[in-house]
Amino acid sequence: KQEVTQIPAALSVPEGENLVLNCSFTDSAIYNLQWFRQDPGKGLTSLLLIQSSQREQTSGRLNASLDKSSGRSTLYIAASQPGDSATYLCAVMADYKLSFGAGTTVTVRA
Amino acid sequence: GAVVSQHPSWVICKSGTSVKIECRSLDFQATTMFWYRQFPKQSLMLMATSNEGSKATYEQGVEKDKFLINHASLTLSTLTVTSAHPEDSSFYICSASEYKQGADTQYFGPGTRLTVL
């Protein structure tokens, strides 16, 4: 069974600092890995999707890397802003199913 | 494009009653829809996978007689929580899968907050 772990569980940083969020998974036979953002009481917003053959994806201030062999992914958010405060979820796709981590809750202080 | 809606967004019900949650893909046809449950500060857990016109496939530990799933069309799936109890209170999220450009992508609904008194 795929296990997805996200560290840290919570993170608080001052505005402008770069964020580094980590995700690890136990079974490297994945189809893709996706990072989502979830605001309190809301659904999921997809941020970045990395196919298993890719090493990284970038969108604006966001960059995600994938090391499938070691079962790790990292999400970098540059120059954080208060609007980046949310919970960030990592999910891996295998056997047509998504397995989610518990998330990292980020607070960016103005 | 690729919008998924859920209705209702929140519901409060008495213990023992049944509650139906709808999930719709608004601008695409979804052959597969997924239902997840999320408890506070926990991960999303897949409950079941439903394909249009066939019975849903439930994950281990999910009672199929309690969580009835119907996927009658390519744009609508429903989850009915039967004889709800307080421990069923949770955030239920659906997703719909679209096959496009050689890949399946899941699009998520906004979620439904169920509170059972």
Image (spheres, coloured by chain):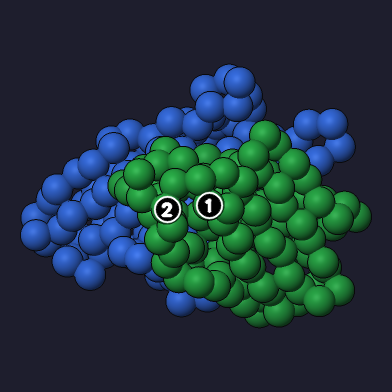
Chain colours: A green, B blue
Q: Residue at x 78, y 31 (%)?
A: B100
Q: How many badges with numbers are in the image?
A: 2
Q: Which residue is mark 2?
A: A14
Q: Nearer the viewer, residue B106 or B77?
A: B106
- Label 2 sits on what residue type? Pro
Chain at numbered mark 2? A
- Label 1 sits on what residue type? Glu
Image coordinates of residue A75 in percent, x first then y, are 65, 56
Q: Residue at x 62, y 77 (%)?
A: A3
Give the class, few, some or many, for how many residues have Cα within 10 Å of label 1's Cα (few <14, many ≥20): some
Chain at numbered mark 1? A
Q: Secondary structure at mark 2?
A: strand
- Answer left or right for B109 relative to B100: left
Q: Quadrant location of residue B33?
A: top right
Q: Secondary structure at mark 1?
A: loop
Residue A72 shows in the view: yes
User: Farthest residue toward the right?
Assistant: A53
- Could you confirm whether marks 2 and 1 are on the same chain? yes
- Answer left or right for A34 relative to A70: left
Image coordinates of residue B60 in percent, x first then y, are 52, 75
Give the class, few, some or many, for how many residues have Cα within 10 Å of label 2's Cα (few <14, many ≥20): some
Residue B53 shows in the view: no
Q: CA distance from mark 2 to mark 1?
A: 6 Å
| Tag 2–tag 1 contact (CB < 8 Å) | yes
Above or below, A82 against B25 in this view is: below
Q: Residue at x 84, y 31 (%)?
A: B101
